[in-house]
Image: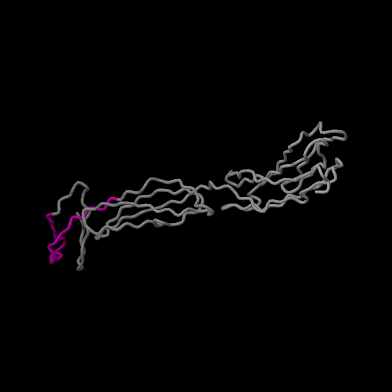
Amino acid sequence: MAAGTPNDGSQTITLPPAVSSSEARIKVEAVDNVFFDISNKSFVINQAPVITCPASKTVETDPGQCAAALPFAATATDDQEGVSVACVPPSGSTFGRGFTAVTCTATDTYGATDSCSFSVTVVDAEAPSIAGLATTPSVLRPPDHKMVNVTVAYQATDNCDALPAVTCALSVTSNEPINGTGDGDKAPDWQILDAHRLRLREERAGGGTGRIYTIGVVCTDGAGNTTAPATTQVLVPLNTAL
């Protein structure tokens, strides 16, 4: 079953998996007149441990982070006491966005091992955030039907991506119709130039209460997560003294 050496020491013998008895009969033969002596008559038939990994996991990033801390447990059984389990990366590690392979190994007191593996995939499901939304100017006067340049200021941040991976777009609506508000009415009433600049018409209905342009901002990150619209208003007041 195994070839020994003429030096003092121990010899490990691998048995077929079906052998499960804790007792063994060992036959030793001398070859070429080599002297041998068995001084230790204690024998252990040791089965390798059996380890089981958790199923592969897909998790979302932690709030405000581009990673996720994940506890998990791999279990092991063995015919001897004292089996240990170690995983790389270990349970509770912070996993970055994307795919990470985890390998776990069970080791018993005699050094026999068994390994398994699973994967952790972290996906970004958090939309960007928009702060500091404001327009310059925020009031248009007099209502002379001219187009006026308006700057839209805001800051877009994301847990994973930065500009230009985070893209933003403007939208405009009005509480009054584009046409039919009175003499001198012109169209269009707005032009979107880019993510921070647009043009609005200084115009309102003469018999109304004043025009309200609602400016919306929507931002999308590299994972396709999109914010709810953030909004602010630009007024064309009925009273030009406002």
Question: Which is nearer the eye, 32 or 84?
Answer: 84
Residue 56, image x and y in percent? 41, 46
Question: Along the horizontal axis of the image, is 7 left or right of 75?
Answer: left
User: Could you tell me residue 132's position as x and y percent?
Assistant: 67, 53
* 167 sits left or right of 113 in the view: right
Q: How many marks?
A: 0
Q: Quadrant of the N terminus?
A: bottom left
Residue 195: x %, y % from top left: 71, 47
Residue 64 falls left or right of residue 132: left
Q: Nearer the viewer, residue 142 or 156?
A: 142
Tell me the magenta residue range.
23-50
Residue 12: horizontal and vertical position, in percent?
22, 59
Query: On the image, which quarter does residue 9 sit in?
Result: bottom left
Q: How is the image coloured?
A: one colour
Q: Is residue 62 left or right of residue 145?
A: left
Residue 233 quadrant: top right
Give residue 2's quadrant in the image: bottom left
* Magenta stretch prevailing secondary structure: loop
Front-lying residue, 100 or 21: 100
What residue is drawn where x is 15% and y is 59%?
43
In this view, which residue lies farthest toward the top? 180
Residue at 46 percent of width and 47 percent of height? 59
Is 72 included in the stretch rendered in magenta?
no
